[in-house]
Image (cartoon, rainbow, N blue to C red):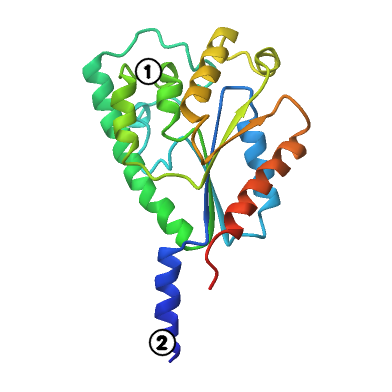
């Protein structure tokens, strides 16, 4: 009887994972890392484990780090690429990273089954929002097509706010680029039922995190219980 019950429990855990997959999107200065650290601190006892990633799970190394004498990645000037990548180079680079996304998605799915909170900043969506950062010379239709094959998060938090205030926090990109990325985020996710927009320039970090916790807790309360 116990073995049958345990098999049933394991099957239901696979069909109805008890973990949570959260994506944080937003322009530089929106507070993604700060928000992520606060979310982790608030949820530290709610899940068996917390996995925090930037962009990808990174099972595969960044292409620039494959060489033995590679220098560490400098993220201080994400839009400082001297030369725009060609189509062939962009497709090859995308193929390599897309494979990493697929492998990473398996790890995320398994983590959710094991009651893990998976927190990813930027994720695949950022490829179409900020192409210059990744130096990808690819069309939106191309990126949107392959988006169908990546694992969908339980909730996507879009961190936004007043452009001037965001620029004051970080000067890595121009205010015009901030406005453009905000436009793209609004256009892409305003009608997405899993997307929640949070203005991080109004109110404190705790207030923003409390709004996010409310959304996450609502998702978990709706889940089937066994």
Q: Where is residue 181 in the image (x, y as percent from the top left)?
A: 52, 18
Between discs 2 and 1, the one toward the N terminus? 2
Mark 2–mark 1 CB contact (< 8 Å):
no
Camera-side residue: 190 or 106? 190
The residue most toward the left is: 88
Examine the image and state in which quarter residue 69 appears: top left
Camera-side residue: 68 or 72? 72
Q: Is residue 19 above or below residue 93?
A: below
Q: Quick one: label 2, few (<14), some, or many (20+) residues within 10 Å? A: few
Q: Is residue 194 visible?
A: yes
Q: Position of residue 67 (x, y in %)?
A: 32, 29
Q: Quarter holding the N terminus?
A: bottom left
Q: Residue at x 61, y 49 (%)?
A: 216
Q: Where is residue 57 in the image (x, y as percent from the top left)?
A: 43, 43
Q: Is residue 67 visible?
A: no
Q: In this view, does 2 lie to the left or right of 219?
A: left
Q: Residue at x 52, y 17 (%)?
A: 183
Q: Residue at x 69, y 49 (%)?
A: 41
Q: Quick one: label 1, few (<14), some, or many (20+) residues within 10 Å? A: many
Examine the image and state in which quarter residue 195 appears: top right
Q: What element carries label 1?
A: loop
Q: Position of residue 161 (x, y in %)?
A: 66, 22
Q: Residue at x 52, y 65 (%)?
A: 224
- List the residue tagged with mark 1: 135
Q: In this view, does 165 lie above or below 214?
A: above
- The numbered dot on residue 3 is 2
CA gap, disc 2 and disc 1? 53 Å
């Amino acid at each position: 009887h116990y073995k049958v019950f345990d098999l049933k429990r394991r099957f239901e855990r696979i069909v109805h994972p008890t973990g949570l997959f959260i994506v944080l999107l937003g322009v530089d200065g929106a507070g993604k890392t700060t928000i992520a650290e606060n979310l982790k601190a608030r949820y530290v006892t709610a899940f068996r484990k917390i996995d925090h990633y930037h962009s990808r799970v990174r099972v595969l190394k960044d292409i620039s780090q494959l060489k033995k004498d590679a220098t560490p990645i400098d993220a201080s000037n994400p839009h400082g690429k001297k030369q725009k990548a060609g189509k062939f180079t962009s497709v090859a680079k995308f193929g390599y990273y897309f494979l990493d996304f697929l492998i990473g998605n398996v790890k995320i799915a398994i983590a959710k089954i094991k009651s893990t909170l998976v927190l990813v900043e930027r994720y695949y969506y950022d490829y179409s929002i900020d192409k210059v950062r990744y130096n990808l010379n690819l069309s939106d239709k191309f990126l949107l097509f392959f988006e169908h094959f990546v694992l969908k998060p339980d909730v996507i938090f879009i961190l936004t706010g007043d452009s001037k205030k965001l620029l004051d926090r970080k000067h890595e990109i121009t205010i015009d680029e901030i406005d453009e990325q905000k436009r793209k985020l609004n256009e892409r996710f305003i009608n997405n039922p899993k997307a929640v927009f949070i203005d991080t320039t109004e109110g404190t970090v705790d207030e923003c995190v409390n709004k996010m916790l409310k959304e996450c807790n609502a998702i978990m309360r709706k889940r089937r219980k066994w």
